[in-house]
Amino acid sequence: MTLLDDDRVRRAGAAHSREEPARLARAVWTAIVEPGDGTAGALVAAHGPDEALRMVEAGLHDGSLAELGLGAQALAAARSRWQPRLDPAHVAQALAQGARAGLVLVTPEDAGWPEQLTDLGTHAPLALWTRGDVTGLSRIARSVAIVGARAATPYGEHVAAELAGELASRGIGVISGAAYGIDGAAHRATLGVGGLTVAVVAGGADRVYPAGHARLFADIARVGAIVSETAPGATPTKWRFLQRNRCIAALSAATVVVEAGARSGTLNTAGHAAALGRPLGAVPGPVTSATSAGCHRLLREFDAQCITSAADVLELIGEGADDATALGGPSAEEVRVRDALASRSPRDVDEIARRSGMAVEAVQAALGLLELAGAVRRTDGGWVLA
């Protein structure tokens, strides 16, 4: 009996499979392989997830992967990696944990699958476990990854928040890893302006890591998405963090490194972005700051673009020059009016005037300019941030 035929696996995977063997097989694969396993990716691409899984359980032979150009050594290594996890109890436990946590499995066959992940080739995720708004995955093609040091300085967190908030207010999605420091600042600023943010995590999407970000995870899941290619319940490990970084880079239209030490893991994300041909930016810092040494190296040796404002990021992703110019110099009145607005609660002109401390006429003039720039919109109930 194969894993796909095991009653425990079928029952545990019922919430994710929709009675489709290929979907169930992809869920099973996430519990068997580590992220970025190219042998598994090649096998699934060639034979489909369910048939590939049956081939593995039946015992791969050298001819199984000959057409994929994989030799006996790669085949033997794959066998040894996967065999310990070809256990129905292990797989069923992971799938049941995903169902209890309310996670949704998104596969390459689904309409909401982010097509930009295909740039990873055979190292692309076999499926994504998602917590929160599943549609967020299909809406992040126009997005930027903002990443950086966990031990960030106040300067770094301030810059990350400024960039994320400004970009999110213009409809640019913000992707990061939900870690302390730069990641957390970027997520929080995006949430603060009602923007779309997606956290790509190294462990199971049902886990909260770091534990101190429990509130942040809940906020992201409420309006954005937390995604992982590892099975529910999986523990974050150093290897999984490094592999997670390739997904952050692939999902984004560009990657911006705000702060990074000389040996920071964030440079791994930058490396993936460069390998994928994605635009790469870095924020300069004080030459005496160890937390900016990695950024300075990216600027000096890896042709990263110097990022000093959200206008620079817009240019990095090919947005219009008019947008960049407008972004670079909002008037004081426009800033005050935007500060007085919310993304979901419409407010009339009188309320905006009261909150901004401005005259009604000045508010009306600023709203007109902001509407032309696409920063605000009028609804039946009043004005909201676009």
Image: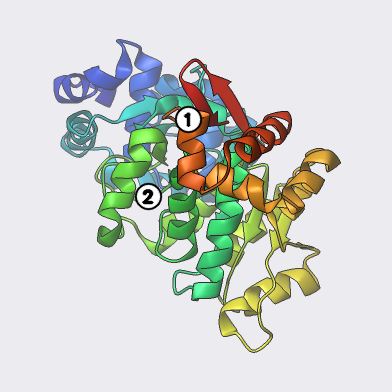
In the image, residue 153 sits, relative to residue 13, either above or below, namely: below
* 356, 183: nearer the viewer: 356
- How many numbered discs? 2
Indicate which disc, 1 or 2, sits on the residue closer to the N terminus. Answer: 2
In the image, residue 278 sits, relative to residue 59, either above or below, namely: below
Q: Position of residue 99 (x, y in %)?
A: 21, 28
Q: Residue furthest bottom?
A: 288
Q: Position of residue 311 (x, y in %)?
A: 74, 51
For the point 19% across and 22% down, the residue is 6
> Residue 4 falls in which quadrant of the image?
top left
> Mark 2 is on which residue type?
Ser
Mark 1 against mark 2, which lies toward the viewer? 1
In the image, residue 228 sits, relative to residue 242, either above or below, namely: above
Q: Position of residue 68 (x, y in %)?
A: 62, 34
Mark 2 element type? helix
> Mark 1 is on which residue type?
Gly
Horizontal placement of 14 versus 167: left or right?
Answer: left
Q: Residue furthest right?
A: 321
In the picture of the structure, the residue carrying the numbered disc 1 is 136
Residue 171 visible? The answer is no
In the picture of the structure, the residue carrying the numbered disc 2 is 80
For the point 58% across and 36% down, the residue is 360
Mark 1 element type? helix
Kindly check if marks 1 and 2 are in contact, taking CB atoms under 8 A apart as contact.
no
For the point 43% across and 20% down, the residue is 51
Q: Quadrant of the N terminus?
A: top left
Label 1: how many residues lie within 10 Å, few (<14), some (14-19) or many (20+)? many
Q: Position of residue 271 (x, y in %)?
A: 66, 60
* 336, 263: nearer the viewer: 336
